[in-house]
Amino acid sequence: MLLVIDSGNTNVVFAIYEGQEQKGCWRATSDSKKTADEYAVWLTQLMALKGLVPGDITGSILANVVPASTYNLTRLCEIYFNSTPLMVELGKIDLGLTVRIDQPEQAGADRLVNAVAGYQRYGGNLILIDFGTATTFDIVGDDGAYEGGVIAPGVNLSVEALYMASAKLPRIDIRRPKNIIGKATIPAMESGIFWGYVSMVEGMVKRIREEYGAPMQVVATGGLAQLFTAATEVIDHLDKDVTLRGLISIYELNTRDKKVR
């Protein structure tokens, strides 16, 4: 079985796959100070609830955008799963796509992985929106190449910034308010955050399509994708597992002579 790790700025996702079948998926808060031992205690207990043991793991792959976490996540795989993880690094492994931007080395691993999986499932001329710590719009060309995109502040980050910078504004939850016009402070903030982001998504998709000059499908992923997908017609597909599928594909591409059970 394959251990797949997607380490982001907010969460680390651990998933186990047998072929294309997901056997378990768990999420932890990103913390670069968390040791391999701490991860192992937490993860192996959750695996046991699914009837899985460390010995089931025959390979691992890691996509990480937090450099300080690399050592502990690598040691987790090496010590507890007897596997040196395949690291998603441009130029060091075959990603199966061309990176067509000015500074390819700056492309985030998660964004490239999403492009791989997005192209495999939906084809080219694609906009991938990831509602994570940042809200990113990534462009996949008609030939599957990664062609850059847009990075905007994430929804949760904006909520926290509004709270921290304003003496009298409370911290709010992200939800779809009943009305656009708020009749009190909290409803007004909820509307500004939710409908403001919907408007940003709709406007950005429109501008990207106009600049790109071709019809484009739109795929949404990330923790808040479902909430926003339900509020706009510009998103064609909701795909919560796009990053995990991309990691599986990259692992298989780079280990063709080894069988992932």
Image (cartoon, rainbow, N blue to C red):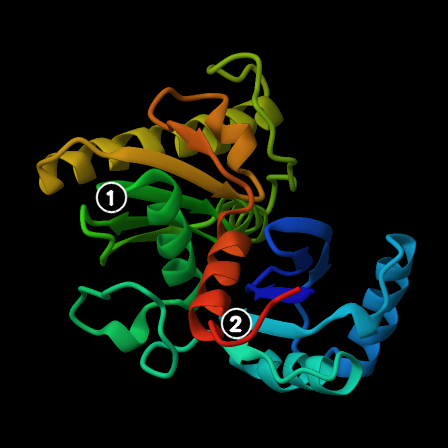
Tell me which amino acid carries mark 1. Answer: Gly
Which element carries disc 1, helix, strand or loop?
loop
Q: In the displayed structure, would residue 204 be above or below residue 4?
A: above
Q: What kind of residue is marked 2?
A: Asn
**Residue toward you, 258 or 170:** 258
Tell me what residue is drawn at x 41 percent, y 78 percent. 89
Rounded to the nearest angstrom, the CA distance separating label 2 from label 1 is: 25 Å
Q: Which mark is residue 64?
A: 2
Judge whether 141 appears above or below 207 on screen. below
Q: Position of residue 141 (x, y in %)?
A: 20, 49
Q: Quadrant of the C terminus?
A: bottom right
- Vertical position of residue 121 compared to residue 113: above or below: above
Pointer 1: what residue? 124
Task: Locate residue 214, reporting x and y percent.
Answer: 12, 35
In the picture, residue 172 is in which quadrant?
top right
Left or right, 121 with respect to 99, comes to right
Q: Quadrant of the N terminus?
A: bottom right
Nearer to me, 175 or 171: 175
Q: Report if residue 133 is visible in the image.
A: no
Residue 174: x, y in percent?
Answer: 60, 34
| x and y percentages locating residue 143 in the rendered image | 19, 51
For marks 2 and 1, the one nearer the N-term is 2
Residue at point 51% right, 37% down? 225
